[in-house]
Image (tube, rainbow, N blue to C red):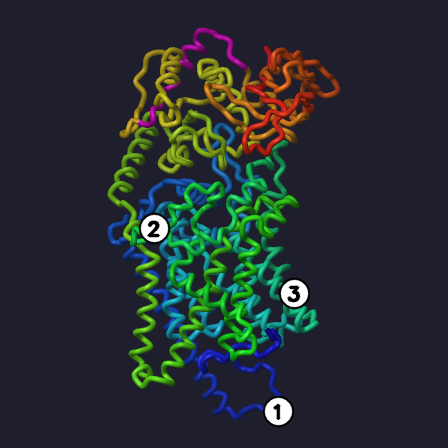
Amino acid sequence: MGVDAVGPELEPSVQPTTTHRSGPPAPLAGRTSVRAARWRAARTEGLAALASAVAAGGIAAVTMQLWSAHLNIPLMGTGGDIALNLMSLRNMQSTGWLTHTPLLGAPFGQDLSPWPSAVGDTWHLLTLKLLSLLLSPAGALNVFYVMTFPAIAAVAYLCLRGLGVSRIFSVPLGAAYALLPYHFLRNESHLLLSEYSVVPLACLVAFWIYNGDVDLAQRPRRYSWREWCTVAASIALLGTGLYYAVFALVLILAAAILRLIATKSLRPLLTATTVSVVVGIGLAVSALPTLLFRGTPSAADAITGRSYAQSEFFSLKIVNLLLPPSYHRLPWLANLTSVTNDSLIGGERTESLGMLGVAGLVLITVALLLPSVANSASPGRRLRMFAVFALTAVLCGTVAGLNGVLAVFGLSQLRAWDRISVYVAFFALAGLGVGLGEALRRARVRWRWSRRPAAAVAASLLVLAVATYDQTSPALTPNEAVITTTWIADQAYFHHAQEVFGAGAAVFQLPYIAFPEGGTVGSIPYNALLLGYVHSDLAWSFGGIKGQESYWQPLALQAGITAAIPKLIVAGFDALYVNRLGYGDGGAAVEAEIIATIGAQTPLVSPDGTIAIYDLRPYAAALRQSGAKLPSLDSVLRPARLEFGDGFYDTESADGKTWRWAQASARATLFNPTNHDVTVLIQGSINVHTPDAAATLTIGADVRQLHVTDHHAEILQRVTIPSGATSLVLWTNSAPTTGAGETRDLRQQVVDLSVTQAG
């Protein structure tokens, strides 16, 4: 393919004008008529973009039945990350920005600086901030999500026009792109990902660079409208999603390299480098709070579990691109997706392109593979170009693809490469648009009836109808009755709790769940422990970043709730919250222990019976009046702790025990956050495969022998550690424990290893 050839012809209404002219200026009347023609063309394109936006917004509104929704109640309920988004919006309202609130992570408060959740979403967050000034958190959430549909459609329409798709098909295909299954499946849970209007802009810039249409290496005063659009797209990319920005840079750099190979010119690479620098600087600036954060030694571990295996699990699957969405109207099509449910690397399953996208992907792939298309006219050449970008995206995102190479070199934090599917979808729909436009052109040449405007309009409406039927479904309609009832009940319950305990009262939450990405415990919905903050002005223990000051919470609970309650009182907690869904027995055992400790009490129980809040204030007053010895505040909130490092695998549990498998040599660190020596008790045990294997425990420079008998050794060591970090190493020469399909090096099972501060 000759990538240095002239770019695709556009319709007269979007034909670019030459910016570098020679000779005398045109007469004034001529310039006026050109300006008027440009205005008419811009107005026509604007109205068509509006039509695409209205179509997408209207279809989305009908699909979700927005007329029955409530502005101040989340459209999709509070499951998944919706509660997290509500938390961020409430933070914006109460403290000015999403990173801080004194009402989470009590008693220290929440500081999200070590968690790079906002990196690359500057423009999204500023939009949400503006909405939060006018609306409730739920209202801002709803308005932002609903408006993503028309916004994506309008931008997609304009970019499809830039790629040479006829107006009559750009309108329905722009709407179809906004109605991708990806959009509905992300919904308000992945709110910022659901706003992917920057993707068509990035695709257009990559196409221009590949086609040699832009050159940012020249002086800005000589820039054409394409160069200025490229600059604008770069600025948009730096603040509308880290994933979308990285994917865009991959395609833009690939376009520049391919252009360089074809033309031997460095100018495309200079343009791509300029875009990359602008986007990179913007991303770095948005990451400054995380980069500059100085907290506890493990604060950088706010995001964990992002390994090579995670990169594979969340990578792009071609089968998921081609299969229909799981909610499809036709059961036999929906059931096709269920066949893949037992996949070990299922991922997020949001990649489905829909019928139109699949048709477009097949079309551009065939165009790429057929030699006869290589020297064809503009449509065939454009199809091949779109295929190059789609193929590049697939190679980068697919299982064990180039994303896996990046993960091998330590870049596994950016794990969900399946999200590059929106780039594949846009190029696929663009290819379909070019193909349909060429088919309509040939039909007009052959058949008289097809020359009528009604025929073109009918073809456009047919495309929109296919997209609507295939990509939407009644299954996407939220159950507003249940959502509204649940929201109102939660709101009333937590308001009542605030009346009982008073605004600002501190509530400790059970069971302990790490934040963020702490997963679920029992059957507690993900992030459900944030709902108290969403609905009240009480202070809650949940929400402090793991690895920061909140590390004291699981340590305080190590010896059971009876021993923990005096510590919670010292830490300033007025109430104890129990989410019964987090316990196999519905919380019966832990609540019995609480009552046995603080005395008989009727807790404040939620309407659905899943939450009970106990008042600690009477028991706290009784303890203080009795003169009972309470632990020091320093020992409660700044205890010595153990953190696992190289050689240890993730935590597993069963039958009340927790363990970590470890390699032959496994390293951990003892942290003493105080400014003086403390004495700690290290307890636990190890199980090994070799019955009488040698095993040692090294604390700092002190090597201690462990006695292995019948595969087992107890650990009970009392040691004084200085302020700061002290290394701890477990070593054994045992043979590995192997199992079917096991790929880890399992040399020692470290059971219930813990560190407690000695009296």
Residue at image mark 3: 257
What separation in Å lies between label 1 and label 2 (alpha carbons)?
A: 64 Å
Residue at image mark 2: 334
Q: Which residue is nearer to you in this view: 237 or 500?
A: 237
The secondary element bearing badge 2 is classed as helix
Left or right? Give the position of 15 relative to 616: right
* First reached walking from the N terminus: tag 3 or tag 2: 3
- Furthest residue in direction front, as rendered: 740
Above or below: residue 213 compared with residue 404: below
Between circles 3 and 2, the one closer to the viewer is 2
Between circles 1 and 2, the one closer to the viewer is 2
* First reached walking from the N terminus: tag 1 or tag 2: 1
Residue 295 coordinates in the image, percent (x, y)? 61, 34
Type of amino acid at the residue the image marks with label 3: Ile
What separation in Å lies between label 3 and label 2 (alpha carbons)?
A: 40 Å
Q: Specify the segment rendered in magenta.
A: 610-631
Above or below: residue 228 compared with residue 656: below
Residue depicted at x 39% and y 72%: 169
Residue depicted at x 66% and y 71%: 262
Residue 177 coordinates in the image, percent (x, y)? 41, 62
Q: Which residue is nearer to you in this view: 600 or 267?
A: 267
* First reached walking from the N terminus: tag 1 or tag 3: 1
Type of amino acid at the residue the image marks with label 2: Ala
Above or below: residue 297 compared with residue 685: below
> Contact (CB < 8 A) between labels 3 and 2?
no
Between circles 1 and 3, the one closer to the viewer is 3
